[in-house]
Image: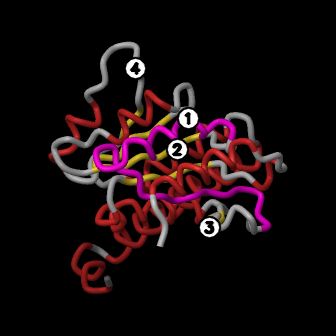
Amino acid sequence: MTDVAALRKLFEAEAERDRPESDRPDVGIIMGSDSDLDVMAGAGEALEELGFVELTDYDDPPEAEYTYESWVVSAHRTPDLLYAYGETAPDRGLDVILAGAGGKSADLPNMTASIAYPIPVIGIPVQEKSVDSVLGMPTGAPITAVDAGKSFNAALSAVQILARTDETLRERLVERQETQAADVATVSESLHRQGTTAFRESR
């Protein structure tokens, strides 16, 4: 059992800790509640598809070139924790943050974007009714966002940002896109050769 004060101290301690860049998480995934996890899990799936490994213990980081971390941080119930997370993000090594929240007052992405600025934050509305809230930032307070539930796409966008200065990630993204294109071509040819009826029966 832990508490908010302990987690705040953890983030602050990690920000002050002298450790190699390779031991720091590249991407942060945060959500307002664990009930958001079914939607937010897509972000981790996308990152792992591209070679990222989840960092679950700062004292025992995985031996991986790219890592991400996951936390529940509520903008409404634990504002102090949100401030600690966002303010320490640069010194803890984060380059991009994916923030997801549900409900009509989905403030976590927006608040994170303001607190962690200039680290890019990609907002993920967990529900359709959260879209307007996540997108509703005033001019001069930027946030990038995806459609409701599209955490997988948010993670791909995060890797695109990192790939601007990382050739390995760029190559992985290109390879993924080429594989998708090849899959479409294979299906297209199969549909054409089999005909609609036979193709539908073979699926």
Give the secondary structure at mark 1. helix
Q: Horizontal placement of 191 versus 106: left or right?
A: right
Residue designated by label 1: 87
Q: Nearer the viewer, mark 1 or mark 3?
A: 1
Q: CA distance from mark 1 to mark 3?
A: 20 Å
Sequence-first disc among 4 and 2: 2
Q: Are marks 2 and 3 in contact (CB under 8 Å)?
A: no
Q: Nearer the viewer, mark 4 or mark 3?
A: 3
Sequence-first disc among 4 and 3: 3
Q: Are marks 4 and 2 in contact (CB under 8 Å)?
A: no
Residue designated by label 2: 85
Amino acid of disc 4:
Ala
Please say which color scheme the image uses.
secondary structure
Crowd class of label 3 (few under 14; some 14 to 19; many from 20; radius 10 Å)? some
User: If the image is split into quadrants, where does the C terminus sit?
Assistant: bottom left
Q: In which image quadrant can residue 15 be found?
A: top right
Residue designated by label 4: 141
Amino acid of disc 2:
Tyr
Crowd class of label 4 (few under 14; some 14 to 19; many from 20; radius 10 Å)? few
The label number, if any, that marks residue 56 in the structure image = 3
Q: Are marks 2 and 1 in contact (CB under 8 Å)?
A: yes
Q: Nearer the viewer, mark 2 or mark 3?
A: 2
Q: CA distance from mark 2 to mark 1?
A: 6 Å
Amino acid of disc 3:
Thr
Q: Is residue 203 above or below residue 125?
A: below
- Residue 135, image x, y percentages: 28, 32
Q: Horizontal placement of 202 versus 90: left or right?
A: left
- Residue 96, image x, y percentages: 57, 41
Q: CA distance from mark 4 to mark 3?
A: 31 Å
Give the secondary structure at mark 4. loop
Amino acid of disc 1:
Glu
Residue at 65% in and 61% down = 52
